[in-house]
Amino acid sequence: MTTPTPIRLGIIDDHRMVREGLRTMLREQRAVEIVGEAENEEEALRMIERDKPEVVLLDIRLRGTNGLEACRVIRERFPDVRVVFLTVYEDEQYVFEALRAGASGYILKKIGDEDLVQVVQSVRDGETIVDSALSGKVALRAASRGSSWAEARYGLSPREAEVLGLITQGLSNQKIAQALFITEETVKSHVRAVLRKLGVHDRTQAVSLALREGLVK
């Protein structure tokens, strides 16, 4: 049986100890391979161009700039690269700003190695992941606005608007199915319809559009 090719991973953090700690933590995880690292936006762009990671881990705070702006630039120049914020900041506003900037995930630095690998795999496969410690706060903010705007503006059915809201909260298809008491295949059908009606290609773009257009707060 052929061993799957490891996911190419980049690290962007202005603290050397954090970068070294991540290398040590992930050293035994064969599902990922750290191919490059950087401590600021300029180095990050060179690293991505040179080492071609599929996913990058990015801190909110960077020396000389901030991670949110770096994320926007990375997504503009390298749209195929998935960005996951790995940070200590437990603020739901940062989560929304990160998703607006095009990130595919927002995870706290206390995450374990196996869970981090799972996040990397999930975002590489097109999912949007929010740390479970923050998902409750995010859900409350998202629930503060109803789905009528999404339904009227983009022609979403009530169920599709509901699915969009859960996608924005970072839930996987399996979790959405459990939350709505429907099958995972039905969820996939709704997700395809949502992407088509929003005019986007993947879940990350759907989340960014939903936040940008004020479909959720």
Image (tube, rainbow, N blue to C red):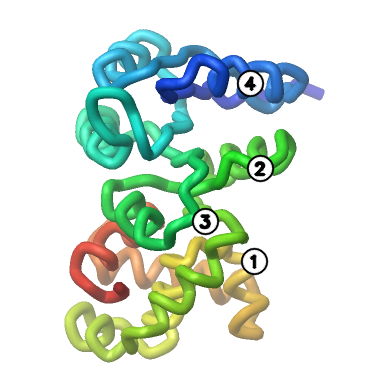
* Vertical comparison of 111 with 8: above or below: below
Task: Kindly report the distance in space between the C-alpha atoms of the residues bearing marks 1 and 4.
Answer: 32 Å
User: In the rendered image, which residue does mark 2 sit on?
Assistant: 111
Kindly indicate whether the residue at mark 1 contacts the one at mark 2 (C-beta within 8 angstroms): no
Kindly indicate whether the residue at mark 4 contacts the one at mark 1 (C-beta within 8 angstroms): no
Residue drawn where x is 27% and y is 75% of the image: 215
Q: Nearest to the eye among marks 1 and 3: give it.
A: 3
User: In the rendered image, which residue does mark 3 sit on?
Assistant: 130
Q: Quick one: SS at disc 1?
A: helix
Q: Nearest to the eye among marks 3 and 4: give it.
A: 4
Task: Kindly report the distance in space between the C-alpha atoms of the residues bearing marks 1 and 3.
Answer: 15 Å
Residue 30 visible to an observer of this rendering: yes
The C terminus - image quarter: bottom left
* Residue 163 circle label: none
Q: Quick one: SS at disc 3?
A: strand
Question: Residue 33 at x, y = what percent?
Answer: 61, 18
The N terminus - image quarter: top right
Numbered circles on residues, count: 4
